Amino acid sequence: MAQQQYPREVENLREGPEHGETGRPFVPARKLNTDYPLIDSDPHFRRVISYARGSDYLAGSLLAASGPALMLWWERISPSEVGKGGFASVMRLSGFISLTAGFLYTYQRSIHRFYGFTENRREIERDMREMTDRVKRGEPLYGKSSMAEYMQGVASRQSRYSGVFLHVMPWFNFVNHAQHGVDTAKYYRNAERELEAERQGS
């Protein structure tokens, strides 16, 4: 079977053979011992949100609602006597903090599955399906980027495993890059198997 040529993992819009290479030595991600397989050590913000399960949103919603509910309960059993205007400010602040906490909790539950910290069979299957389809369509695995390869690496090192400390400093990855701590050859091999099966079946 002839070896099919596939695009790079990230299509760079500023550098490459046609623009001039400006890359520097690759700094690999540190391997962590986890109970489940690693999917991505630095997933893009969109992927984390789209891969979140219904149980994640439910848990986040309950946490977000608990703050205002607790303030109402406290006001009921021990009135603050600050008046309607003062208590409204308290409720707005409580609502903002609770919504933020609920979102971060949802995000953290989802990103921990990418890291392999919690059970992630569903995410592994979805990741393989998504990446295999991209390979078959001739698309770069991790999208396009206008950043130089070196700056992509800088961005990756800043946000790699940032979900571990999300409760201390919320930090998200908004950069398309190819440094995700996994061997992407598995996607290309799976795509080749499917393409070969499709050719034999036609």
Image (cartoon, rainbow, N blue to C red):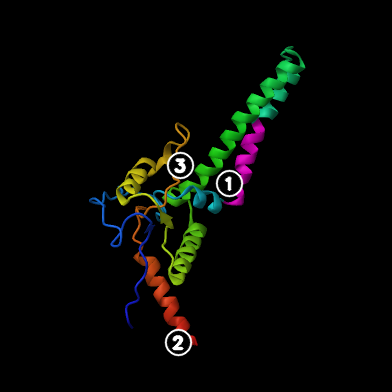
Magenta part, dominant SS:
helix
* Extreme residue in the left direction: 25
* Secondary element at tag 3: loop
Left or right of 22, for residue 45 = right
Q: Which residue is mark 3?
A: 172
* Secondary element at tag 1: helix
Write down the region rendered in magenta: 53-66
In the image, which is nearer the foreground, mark 3 or mark 2?
3
Q: Earlier in the sequence, mark 1 or mark 3?
A: 1
Q: Residues within 10 Å of mark 3 (few under 14, many from 20)?
A: many
Q: Are marks 1 and 3 in contact (CB under 8 Å)?
A: no
Q: Which residue is more in the foreground, 183 or 38?
A: 183
Asked if the stretch drawn in magenta spans residue 61, the answer is: yes
Q: Earlier in the sequence, mark 2 or mark 1?
A: 1
Q: Which residue is more in the foreground, 14 or 48?
A: 14
Disc 3 to disc 2, C-alpha distance: 43 Å
In the image, which is nearer the foreground, mark 1 or mark 3?
3
Residue 4: mark in rendering: none
Q: Which residue is mark 2?
A: 200
Q: Is residue 29 above or below residue 138?
A: above
Q: Which residue is mark 1?
A: 56
Dot 2 amino acid type: Gln
Residue 96 percent coordinates (x, y): 62, 30
Residue 173 percent coordinates (x, y): 44, 45
Dot 1 amino acid type: Asp
